[in-house]
Amino acid sequence: MRCSPARPATFHSVFAVGEFRALWVSQTLSEAGDRIALVALTLLVFSRTRSPLLSAVAYAAGYVPWVIGGLLFCGLGDRLPRREVMVACDAIRAVLVAVMLIPQIPLAGLVGLLYLTALAQAPFEAARSAILPDILTGQRYALATAVMQTSFRIAMVAGAAIGGVTVAFIGARPAVGADAATFLASAMLVRFGTRPRPAAAPGPNPLKQLSEGARLVLGDKALRTLMMLGNLIALYSIPEGIAAPYAARLSGGPAAAGLVVAAGQVGAVLVAPVYTKKVGPLTRLRWMGPMAVCACAVLLLTVFRPDLALSLAIFALSGTFAVYQLAANIAFVEWVPGKCRAQAFGLANMGLVICQGGALMLAGAAAQVMPPATVIALSGGLGTVTACGLALRWRHLPAIQQPLLHRAPARPAGRRTQQRQRWKAGPLTRTVAERQPHAAQASLERVAAHPDEPGG
């Protein structure tokens, strides 16, 4: 029996879903506000201390607390209703950011409050990432992911640029006030724009849930490789962490530093929608490794000490190749069961921010004793070597060589034949078929929508 081709998904069909629109606007608002506040506080620290290390520590405040939040709180998105988790996190963050507006708070207090705000961000992002596949599935989920990540990058670009300009003209505290308002708006959108859903896995012991999530994420070779490919962002995002000293070396001020932070997102903003719409699912998986290598290798050009305009072009090109993260995100969702999706996302994000926060601090320390351009070039070289190893590892996984999920069997096989096929397919395919049977149908629907895709 032949399957009728699935109707191709479109961006219009994605935006036709009201719940997605609410999540999309919520994320865009809160991320723009976060970026404005983060850039403002980073520039405030650098202007008062003139220390690249301390400014990198302040910038890392947006990442490091994910370690604690990922360990302790991301499982809330599985144990409790995900909508309520997101609303509570937004409310907590709005209060914490509002406290930053008190004039008497010292610089260390502002950074501490920023760390607490990022702590509440971890369960919010885990719950939002986990609920999105419940709202949209199949190719529509792939397009929705592209929209969310593209909007995320646009918000980062706009927030970084506005943050730099705001500090230059009216100071840091008005930027912080805008961040508090975005959290309140986000909470209202999530509360009244999405419908309530029961908890995915209510009641398990938090420590047991954490242990099971760690075994799931770390016990699968393909999931480990996906996580490490994602963690490469720690190396190719170094320009953001030392943007202030880098711009200062080029005789630029706060506005130039904001442009350095924003440049890394511009390429991805332009390419991500086309990449997801025009490139088939299997091709996206196979391109991940080479694109990760290019995202890091481009940064080697900074060793020639380019001017500000060329630097912005280099960072934008690096961000263009970084759209491979879309494929990694989609693959991760498909290969993790829904009942522990928030915990898995939380652990994956925790590993990412450990790498990113640590890399930012090391880069800031290195920029104390060597030119920032040299630091960026070194990070690009290290990332290139690492990405080459991961690309080879990903290429030789059985699920990539023989992706059985993307092939419909000609006729039902016997029990012994099915067992031999399962073991021949490799651990990743076995895990998908056993943990999440609907992923096979979703994959077949994607191939029907992309009949020219290899292996379809």
Image: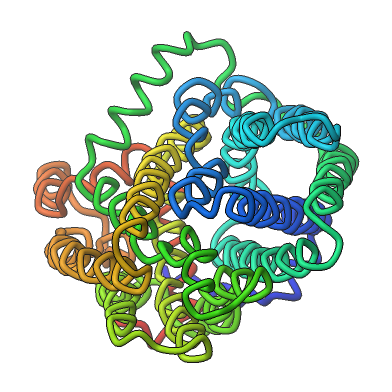
Q: Name the quarter where the C terminus is drawn.
A: bottom left
249 horizontally vs 35: left or right: left
Q: Tell me, what colour scheme is on the image?
A: rainbow
**Number of marks present in the image shown:** 0
Q: What residue do we see at 58% from left, 46% from top?
A: 129
Q: Looking at the image, is 192 positioned above or below residue 92?
A: below
Q: Nearer the viewer, residue 213 or 325?
A: 325
Q: Where is residue 165 drawn, in percent x and y?
A: 76, 70
Position of 288 compared to 66: left or right? left
Check the image and report above or below for 439 versus 277. Answer: above
Where residue 14 appears, x then y in whole percent? 71, 67
Does 432 sit left or right of 151 as displayed? left
Residue 436 showing in the rendered view:
no
Q: Nearer the viewer, residue 105 or 2?
A: 105
The percent position of residue 356, horizontal first and vertical second, equals 40, 49
The residue at the point 64 percent across, 43 percent down is 128
| Relative height, residue 280 to residue 100 (above, below) | below
Q: Is residue 283 above or below residue 88?
A: below
The residue most toward the front is 49
Q: Give coordinates of residue 89: x percent, y percent.
A: 72, 31
Can residue 70 be seen here?
Answer: yes
Residue at 82% x, 48% y is 173
- Residue at (46, 61) in percent of width and height: 242
The quadrant in which the N terminus is found is bottom left
